[in-house]
Image (tube, rainbow, N blue to C red):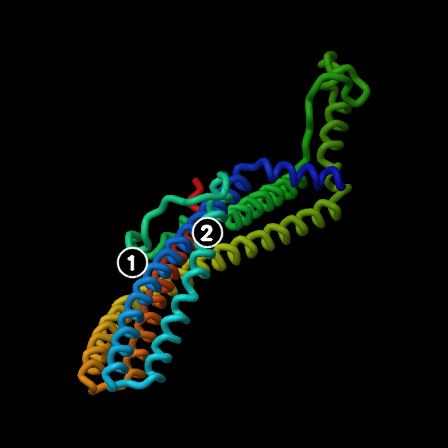
C-alpha cells in the first residue's frame, strides 16, 4: 500500500498538471513581488517629495517666528512632522532591498538590484465589458482533477454494468475437455450446450455481488459528479468575487484623485494664508499630513488592483493550456 501511494505521488509530481500548477504559482509570486517592489519605489518617491515640502514649510515657519508672527511651538511642531516623515525613508529603502533580493531568488539569480519600470507605467483596465467564459475554468487543476475523477467513475459504472452480460471466449487450448483444434468435437451438441450454459450462468451465480458492485460504482459516480459540480461552482464564485472586488477597487480611482487634487490645493492655500497671517500653522501641517496619507493610499489602491489581476490569473488556472 505504501509503495503504491509513493508511486501515485511520484506520478503526480511528474505529471503535466502538477508542473503547470507549480509554474503558475511561481509566475504569480514573481508578479506579486514585482508589483510590491514598484509600489515601494513609488512610496519612497512620494515620501522624499513630501520631505522637501515639509522642509520648505519648516523654513517658512522659522522665518515667520523671526518676524514675530509665529512662536517656537509652531517651529517645533513643523520639525516633528518633518522628522517623523524622514524616519520612514530608511525603512522603505530596507524593504526595497529585501524585496529585490526576494525577487532575485524567485528568478533563480543571486540577490542584487532589479531593473524595473515604475508603478505609474503599469496599466489597469478600468472597464470590463464582458465577463469570463466558464470554459476558462477548465484550466484550473482542481476542476481538471474533478472532471477526470468523474470520467473514471463513469467508466467504472459502465464496466460494472457490462459484467452482467455473459461472456464466451473462443481461444486455443481445450474447451470442456476437448481439443479446440478438433472442431468436430467442439460442435457436438452436448459440448456446445455445456459451453454456452457455463458462460450464461456464471453471472447468475454472482448476481448479488455484481448488483452490489454496480450500486457502489453508481454511488461513486454520483458522488464524483456532485464533487465536479461543486468544484466548478466554487471556482466560478472565486473568479466572480475577484472581478467584483476589482471593479469596486477601480471605482475608487477618480474619487482618490479628486481627494489628492483638493489636498494639493489645500496645502497651497494654507501656506499662502500662513504667510499672510490669516491661518494657523496647525492647518498647514494637517493639510500636508493628509496629502501624504492620500498619496500613499493611492499607491496602495494601484497595488491592490494589480494584485487582483494576479489573483485572477491564478483563479483561471494560471493560463496553462
Which percent across, then down, holds residue 103? 46, 47
State the residue position of label 2: 97
The structure residue drawn at horizontal position 31% and vertical position 67%, both measured from the top left corner, is 50
Question: Would residue 312 be visible to someone looking at this image?
Answer: no
Decide which of 70, 99 is in the foreground and name it: 70
Q: Quadrant of residue 46?
A: bottom left
State the residue position of label 1: 128
The structure residue drawn at horizontal position 76% and vertical position 21%, both measured from the top left corner, is 175
- Do the numbered discs 1 and 2 sit on residues whose CB atoms are within 8 Å? no
What separation in Å lies between label 1 and label 2 (alpha carbons)? 35 Å
Q: Secondary structure at mark 1?
A: loop
Decide which of 232, 114 is in the foreground and name it: 114
- Which quadrant: the N terminus? top right
Which percent across, then down, holds residue 288? 30, 74
Decide which of 217, 291 is in the foreground and name it: 291
Circle 1 packing at 10 Å, graded few (<14), some (14-19), many (20+), is: few
Q: Quadrant of residue 274?
A: bottom left
Q: Secondary structure at mark 2?
A: helix
Residue 168 shown left or right of residue 229 in the figure: right
Amino acid at each position: 500500500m505504501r509503495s503504491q501511494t509513493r508511486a501515485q505521488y511520484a506520478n503526480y509530481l511528474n505529471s503535466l498538471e502538477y508542473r503547470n500548477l507549480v509554474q503558475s504559482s511561481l509566475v504569480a509570486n514573481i508578479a506579486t513581488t514585482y508589483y510590491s517592489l514598484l509600489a515601494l519605489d513609488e512610496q519612497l518617491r512620494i515620501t522624499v517629495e513630501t520631505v522637501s515640502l515639509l522642509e520648505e514649510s519648516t523654513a517658512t515657519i522659522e522665518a515667520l517666528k523671526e518676524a514675530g508672527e509665529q512662536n517656537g511651538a509652531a517651529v517645533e511642531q513643523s520639525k516633528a512632522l518633518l522628522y517623523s516623515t524622514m524616519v520612514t525613508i530608511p525603512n522603505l529603502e530596507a524593504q526595497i532591498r529585501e524585496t529585490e533580493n526576494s525577487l532575485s531568488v524567485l528568478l533563480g539569480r543571486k540577490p542584487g538590484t532589479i531593473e524595473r519600470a515604475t508603478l505609474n507605467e503599469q496599466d489597469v483596465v478600468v472597464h470590463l465589458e464582458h465577463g469570463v467564459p466558464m470554459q476558462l475554468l477548465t484550466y484550473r487543476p482542481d476542476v481538471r482533477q474533478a472532471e477526470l475523477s468523474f470520467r473514471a467513475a463513469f467508466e467504472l459504472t459502465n464496466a460494472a454494468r457490462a459484467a452482467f452480460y455473459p461472456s464466451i471466449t473462443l481461444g486455443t487450448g481445450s474447451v470442456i475437455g476437448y481439443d479446440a483444434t478438433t472442431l468436430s468435437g467442439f460442435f457436438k451438441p452436448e459440448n456446445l450446450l455445456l459451453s454456452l450454459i457455463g458462460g450464461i450462468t456464471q453471472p447468475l451465480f454472482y448476481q448479488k455481488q455484481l448488483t452490489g458492485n454496480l450500486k457502489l460504482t453508481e454511488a461513486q459516480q454520483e458522488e464524483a459528479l456532485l464533487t465536479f459540480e461543486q468544484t466548478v461552482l466554487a471556482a466560478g464564485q472565486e473568479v466572480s468575487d475577484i472581478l467584483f472586488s476589482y471593479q469596486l477597487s477601480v471605482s475608487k480611482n477618480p474619487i482618490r484623485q479628486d481627494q489628492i487634487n483638493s489636498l494639493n490645493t489645500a496645502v497651497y492655500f494654507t501656506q499662502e494664508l500662513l504667510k499672510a497671517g490669516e491661518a494657523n500653522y496647525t492647518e498647514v501641517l494637517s493639510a500636508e499630513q493628509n496629502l501624504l496619507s492620500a498619496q500613499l493610499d493611492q499607491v496602495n489602491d494601484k497595488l491592490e488592483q494589480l494584485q487582483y489581476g494576479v489573483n485572477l490569473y491564478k483563479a483561471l488556472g494560471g493560463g496553462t493550456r
